[in-house]
Structures are given as structure tokens and as C-alpha cells.
Image (cartoon, coloured by chain):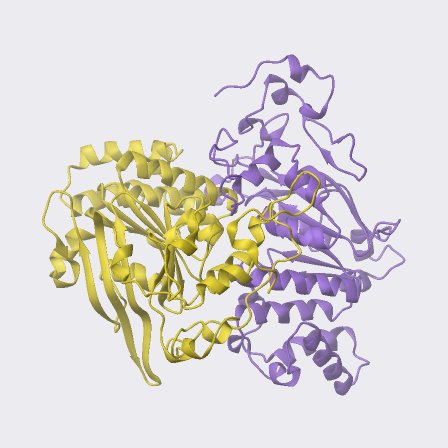
Chain colours: A yellow, B purple
């Protein structure tokens, strides 16, 4: 925990190219992904040149508030942006045993095959993902048949998956969706989404609307699933602390862009973007002192009217002229940690992180990281 | 500081629902859902109590019973010494309308608790007209504007003219809060009142409620599934946290004690379920033998948590543990677990295995 970030870059803050954050063995490459909608009020850009590479078998958490474009990122990854949205950029998938697939150039039928079989998806609210008049078993069968899989073998796998998820296979398979509790339903959906043994699982708020205990249990099961099936997972949520316990890497989304990305620990303990730091400080934590919780002033921007320069500048305490004039590229506090902010050094120095202020035995607060040299802002 | 006399006193409260079968089940026995069982809890003036537990543990039913919206099937709910349901039947000194006004509620989803066809002004004016027919329109408006300012919605005259869809989630919840405050309540039940808000807005909403607790001397019964929010709210409000499992309170105590030194294994589970930004503190192993909560129709015998509890032994199946005060703590902190008994056959009996 003593890496001195100041040594890794010069005082001039040379902007590094984004490619240095890329994966060594990417299973998915999302380059300059942009989604736009034409509206009467003007062009609404709900995904703004997002660059993200998924390392094979990693779990990456994407965190953003409501209306930050995080669900659009999930849709873009499967080329399933709702009409009349326009998706531009490149989305490529690299299977281990086949040639690279360019998702945006596939025919409808080819795309249908890739979805679920190679890249699968779990949405929020299992009730609306299931057909209420079909039993759970029928869902599994239909999925296997539609994708020309051996139904008998597939059902064996389904049973195994269900019991891995702490469910009784017979009881669940013979139930209708409404007969299961919310947590059981969401786990059955998870089993359904991986029954075709996909490589990549994209999840959009897969545990929202469940209580914390069930959320945490499902996350634990996902981790086990990832290991036993060598899955690559992308987990989209508004709940930063929740996904932190699961993800290898995290990316923070603000106003339709990824503003910070890095290994989970770096993102929690050495967050560099003022927005990430504010987000961390607005979350009550079980062990952190309570008196310094602060909410973030202001509101996220409207997609038709995103501020010039850095889109966070109207809410940012460190904003200056250049933040309004130009859009920051990624700076690299560490080689695998990128942040789109000109003033990330200042943010780290002047905004202390509440959750790092551990307590020593006498009950006094101690500061335990290199970030906390400055005082309160 | 806490008053001597409790504002609200729940004694051995029991709420059982009869789960009536459909036409085809005509000849089956009706199933009894034991939503709340044997709960005793005192809430004082300017007090803050948070009820924490997973979905289906009965916390909402208990909350609604506490404010007189749900009739208990057993036990009593007393408001300043008067039985709420006796008052409702007209057998008490205090008129029921007074009790009803004193106990208010804020729901989880502010979107569906505000009438979409009415402006904020009228949403707030209607309940005033009902309860204060003697007030003039001007007096009412004055009151409404001042309340909106209190909850941070300025300019109040502008917000008062808006419809709910023109407000953000946080603003809608503020309107719901000011509607609850209109009656000068003694206690507000906040039922998952911040759960639907974005994470970054939750602290703001809790701070607002705490400010109002001081300004209006209101008590709060705060229902949440999130232990860290419950801790934030109760710590600042000088209150207590109650852990609830399958209709029973299993541990009650001051927030620091309950979150940092949980005594009941279920409270330990709630702590495990709460995400921690300090990754080193986050334990990976689930302190539970089963993920799913048992059916409240047929709750487990003895200690209801024994089917999932990692500490459960044979004795836990036979007998129900009674609340035990935790020694060496000056304020009231108790847990219902045999591990708090010095001498109990629990210590000699065999661990349960699945």
C-alpha cells in the first residue's frame, strides 16, 4: 500500500494514451462506443466514446448513478441498443478457439447465436425476464432447443447449476416464476443465463430490488460461478460498496463516460477522480467515522446538454478554466489506473477519504495512507 | 435525553395473518402466517429506533402495527399509556384522531405515495383541510410554504406549484416527509424511506430527517435492510438498532455495540451482508448454513434461526431463548441467544449438522 504515485509521472502531467490501460488478453474490446438519439431538443448522446477492454476471466464492476448511461453500455456490448438509438464505434469479441468477431458487422441471425451462447446477459428484475405462463423448466428447455443444444445434457447442467446456487433443482424447475421468492427467482435466472456455457456474462443491476443479505449471498455465488465456469463478468450497478467485494477491477461512469478505471483496491483506497472520491464519501460504511459523510452537491447533467470540457466541472470543487475549455484524457496515477481529470493530484491531496480513517484502540482517528497528507478541503 | 415515560409501548405484540386458500383449497386448513411474534419494544420522545432484517422478517408489519395501521392479533400497543386499538373503538380518554395524527408514515416509493394528478400544494393542503377545518386558506399556505422550506425545497412557492413528475426522487421524498410533518407528529415511521434513492442522496435525506427530529421533537422508527444506513441514522439520533428475524426481535442495542460487537449470530449475518469499503474487513465466508429464509407459515421450533445459524446446537431446536442483557454495557443491549447464558444445556449439546 505504499506505492508512491508521484514517482510514476512527471510534474508536467503528461497525458498518456488510453491504450496503456488495455487488457493483455482481451476477451471483449469496446472502442469509442457511442450511442446517440435524435431528439427535438437536439442530439442526445447517452454513451460517449467509451473505451473499455475486458480481460479474460476477470470480474469488472461498472458503477454509475441513475442516468449516467451505464445500462446503455450493457446494451451496446450486445448490440441491442433500443431503437431509434444509433450505436457507433467498435465492439469486438475474441473467442478462445475461433477468430475475432466484430459484433457490429454481424447479421441478425449471427448475432442471435452469439448472444446467450457466447455473451449472455442478466437484467434487473427477474420477474420481467421470465415468461409468467411457463414453468422454469420450460425456460431452460426452450433456451437449449433454440440454440440447438442437447437438451438432456443441458438439463443435467441446469440441475447442477441450480444446486450450486443453493436451490433445490426439482422444486425450482417445476415451479412457475411467481411461485419463487425474489432471491430464488434471480438465482434461477442466473442459472438460465449461463446454461449455454457462455464466455462473457453482462449483468445490469442483477441484484437490485433484493435485500442486502440476498444481494450479498448472490454475489458470493457469482464468484463461485465465475471460478468454476471460467466466466468473464461485467457487473453494472449504482452501488459502489456492493460490487467492490466482488470485482477485480472497477470503472466509474459519470455523464455517459468512464471517468476512472483501475484495480478495485486502487479505486477504493487511492481514488483519483473528484467524483469517485465524493461518491465514496457519500456512502455510509460500517466501520468509518460517521461525522464526515457528505452528499454530492448538484445533479448529473442532461444528455442533450452535457457541459463543455470535463462534464463534472460544474460540481467539482477543483474546477478551473482548463476544465471548462478542454476535455481531460486519461492520466495514469499508476500503470493500470486511469483517471480523466486534470486535477487528480489535487483531489487526492485535498479530499480525504472517510472510509480510510480507521480507528486505533484509543478511539482516536488515524490516517493510514499516503493520500491523506493535506487537510480537509 | 430520553424521557422517562415511553411515547409508544409495544407489549408482546403478535400479528398473525390467516392465509386463506383459494376456492380449490376450500377443505384445507387455513395457513397462519406469523408475521410478528412476541415483540416488546418501548419508543421514547425524540427517540430513534432502526429495525433491520431481510425481506419477509416482519419489520414492515411491526412498523405498521406500531403506528396503529395494523391491528395486532395479540399483545398491546400503547400511545402515552393509552391502548391504541381501545382508543380506536372509542373506549379511551384520548380521541383516536389525535393518536392517528401523532403517528405518521413515509413510504418506500415516493413516486407511488404522491398523487400524480395533484400539485405539491394540493397534496399538502388536503390533509390539512381534513384535520384543521378551522384554518383559513392563507394560514394553510403559510404553513405549507414554511414546511417546504424546512425540508430544503426553496423557493417554496415555486415547488408548491409543481406536479410530482416534475420532481426528482429525492424531492418527492421530501414532499412525503413534509406531508408527514404537517400533523406535528410525535413519531414518524420511515419504511425503507431512503432505499429507492441513489446512494449519493441517502446521507442527505437521513441528515434532513435528523434535523427535523431536533426541530420538531419527532421520534423515528426507521426500517431498513441496510445495517450501515441504520447505524448512521441511529448513531446521529442517539438511538438503538433492533435486529429482526422471522417476526421476532433477536437483538436490540446502541448502534456502536450492535454493529461493532454483534452478539446474536443473525446480527453477525447482517454485518456480513453489509458491503464494506475496507476490503480487509470484508469477510468472504458466509456465516450462515442456508441462504433462504424459512417459510413464516411454519417457523422452525425453538430458536427460529437454528436452521441457518452456524452456532446452532441441539438445544436450540428444543427451547426458545429469552432476551439476555449483555453484561458490562451500561445501556440496554440484549440478545436472544443461548450463547449469552452462562449455564445452559446449549454448551453441552451437539452442534447441528445438515
- Looking at the picture, how far across and down is residue A359, in whole percent? 64, 43
Residue placed most toward the observer, B90 or A255: A255
Residue placed most toward the observer, A186 or A249: A249
Q: Quadrant of residue A192?
A: top left
> Residue A2 vs residue A94: left or right?
right
> Residue A352 vs residue A174: left or right?
right
Q: In which quarter of the image is residue A88?
A: bottom left
Q: In which quarter of the image is residue B89?
A: bottom right
> Residue B106 vs residue B40: left or right?
left
**Image vertical order of residue B100 relative to residue A308, above or below:** above
Residue placed most toward the observer, B210 or B39: B210
Residue placed most toward the observer, A275 or B254: A275
- Looking at the picture, how far across and down is residue B103, in whole percent? 75, 60
> As drawn, which residue projects farthest toward the bottom?
B138
**Image vertical order of residue A82 relative to residue A229, above or below:** below
In this rendering, does residue A242 appear at all? Answer: yes
**Image vertical order of residue A49 relative to residue B12, above or below:** below
In this rendering, does residue B64 appear at all? Answer: no
- Looking at the picture, how far across and down is residue A276, in whole percent? 47, 60
Residue located at (18% from left, 37% from top): A151
So how many labels did they put on this image?
0
- Looking at the picture, how far across and down is residue B20, in whole percent? 55, 44
Residue located at (86% from left, 54% from top): B91
Amino acid at each position: 500500500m505504499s506505492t508512491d504515485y508521484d514517482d510514476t509521472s512527471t510534474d508536467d502531467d503528461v497525458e498518456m494514451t488510453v491504450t496503456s490501460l488495455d487488457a493483455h488478453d482481451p476477451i471483449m474490446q469496446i472502442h469509442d462506443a457511442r450511442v446517440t438519439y435524435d431528439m427535438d431538443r437536439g442530439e442526445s448522446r447517452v454513451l460517449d466514446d467509451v473505451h473499455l477492454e475486458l480481460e479474460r476471466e476477470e470480474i469488472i464492476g461498472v458503477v454509475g448513478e441513475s442516468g449516467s448511461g451505464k445500462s446503455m453500455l450493457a446494451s451496446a456490448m450486445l448490440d441491442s441498443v433500443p431503437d431509434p438509438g444509433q450505436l457507433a464505434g467498435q465492439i469486438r469479441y475474441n473467442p478462445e478457439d475461433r477468430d475475432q468477431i466484430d459484433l457490429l458487422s454481424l447479421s441478425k441471425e449471427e448475432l442471435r447465436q452469439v448472444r446467450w451462447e457466447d455473451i449472455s446477459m442478466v437484467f434487473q428484475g427477474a420477474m420481467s425476464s421470465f415468461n409468467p405462463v411457463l414453468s422454469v423448466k420450460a425456460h431452460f428447455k426452450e433456451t437449449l432447443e433454440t440454440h440447438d443444444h442437447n437438451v438432456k445434457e443441458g438439463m443435467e447442467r441446469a440441475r447442477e447449476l441450480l444446486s450450486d446456487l443453493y436451490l433445490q433443482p426439482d422444486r425450482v424447475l417445476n415451479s412457475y416464476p411467481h411461485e419463487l421468492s425474489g432471491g430464488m427467482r434471480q438465482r434461477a435466472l442466473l442459472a438460465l443465463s449461463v446454461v449455454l456455457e457462455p464466455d462473457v456474462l453482462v449483468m445490469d443491476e442483477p441484484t437490485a430490488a433484493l435485500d442486502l443479505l440476498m444481494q450479498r449471498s448472490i454475489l458470493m455465488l457469482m464468484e463461485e460461478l465465475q471460478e468454476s465456469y471460467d466466466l468473464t463478468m461485467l457487473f453494472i450497478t449504482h452501488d459502489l460498496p456492493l460490487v467492490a467485494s466482488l470485482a477485480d477491477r472497477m470503472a466509474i461512469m459519470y455523464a455517459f463516460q468512464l471517468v476512472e478505471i483501475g484495480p478495485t483496491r486502487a479505486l477504493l483506497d487511492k481514488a483519483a477522480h473528484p467524483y469517485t472520491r465524493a461518491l465514496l464519501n457519500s456512502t455510509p460504511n460500517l466501520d468509518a467515522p460517521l461525522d464526515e459523510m457528505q452528499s454530492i452537491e448538484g445533479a448529473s447533467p442532461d444528455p442533450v446538454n452535457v457541459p463543455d470540457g470535463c462534464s463534472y466541472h460544474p460540481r467539482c470543487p477543483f474546477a478551473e478554466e482548463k476544465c471548462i475549455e478542454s476535455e481531460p484524457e486519461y492520466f495514469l496515477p499508476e500503470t493500470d489506473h486511469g483517471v480523466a481529470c486534470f486535477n487528480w493530484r489535487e483531489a487526492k491531496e485535498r479530499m480525504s477519504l472517510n472510509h480510510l480513517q480507521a480507528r486505533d484502540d484509543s478511539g482516536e482517528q488515524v490516517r493510514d495512507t499516503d493520500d491523506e497528507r493535506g487537510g480537509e478541503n | 435525553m430520553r424521557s422517562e415515560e415511553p411515547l409508544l409501548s409495544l407489549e408482546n405484540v403478535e400479528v398473525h395473518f390467516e392465509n386463506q386458500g383459494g376456492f380449490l383449497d376450500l377443505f384445507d386448513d387455513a395457513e397462519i402466517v406469523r408475521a410478528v411474534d412476541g415483540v416488546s419494544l418501548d419508543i421514547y420522545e425524540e427517540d430513534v429506533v432502526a429495525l433491520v432484517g431481510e425481506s419477509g422478517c416482519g419489520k414492515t408489519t411491526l412498523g405498521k402495527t406500531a403506528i396503529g395501521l395494523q391491528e395486532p392479533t395479540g399483545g398491546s400497543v400503547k400511545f402515552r399509556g393509552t391502548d391504541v386499538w381501545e382508543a380506536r373503538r372509542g373506549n379511551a380518554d384520548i380521541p383516536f384522531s389525535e393518536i392517528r395524527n401523532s403517528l405518521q408514515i413515509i413510504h418506500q416509493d415516493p413516486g407511488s405515495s404522491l398523487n400524480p394528478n395533484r400539485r405539491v400544494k394540493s397534496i399538502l393542503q388536503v390533509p390539512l383541510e381534513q384535520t384543521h377545518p378551522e384554518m383559513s386558506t392563507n394560514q394553510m399556505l403559510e404553513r405549507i410554504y414554511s414546511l417546504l422550506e424546512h425540508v430544503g425545497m426553496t423557493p417554496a412557492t415555486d415547488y408548491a406549484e409543481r406536479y410530482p413528475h416534475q420532481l426528482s426522487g429525492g424531492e418527492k421524498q421530501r414532499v412525503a416527509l413534509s406531508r408527514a410533518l404537517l400533523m406535528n407528529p410525535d413519531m414518524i415511521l420511515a419504511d425503507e424511506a431512503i432505499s429507492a434513492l441513489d446512494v449519493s442522496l441517502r446521507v442527505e435525506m437521513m441528515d434532513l430527517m435528523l434535523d427535523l427530529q431536533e426541530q420538531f421533537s419527532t421520534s423515528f422508527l426507521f426500517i431498513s435492510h441496510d445495517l450501515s444506513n441504520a447505524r448512521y441514522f441511529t448513531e446521529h439520533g442517539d438511538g438503538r438498532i433492533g435486529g429482526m428475524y422471522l417476526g421476532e426481535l433477536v437483538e436490540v442495542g446502541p448502534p456502536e455495540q450492535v454493529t461493532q460487537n454483534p452478539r446474536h449470530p443473525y446480527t453477525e449475518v447482517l454485518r456480513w451482508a453489509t458491503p464494506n469499503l475496507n476490503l480487509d474487513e470484508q469477510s468472504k465466508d458466509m456465516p450462515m448454513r442456508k441462504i433462504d429464509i424459512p417459510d413464516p407459515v411454519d417457523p422452525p421450533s425453538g430458536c427460529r434461526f437454528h436452521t441457518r445459524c452456524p452456532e446452532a446446537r441441539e438445544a436450540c431446536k428444543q427451547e426458545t431463548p429469552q432476551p439476555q442483557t449483555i453484561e458490562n454495557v451500561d445501556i440496554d443491549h440484549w440478545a436472544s441467544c443461548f450463547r449469552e447464558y452462562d449455564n445452559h444445556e446449549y454448551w453441552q449439546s451437539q452442534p447441528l449438522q445438515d
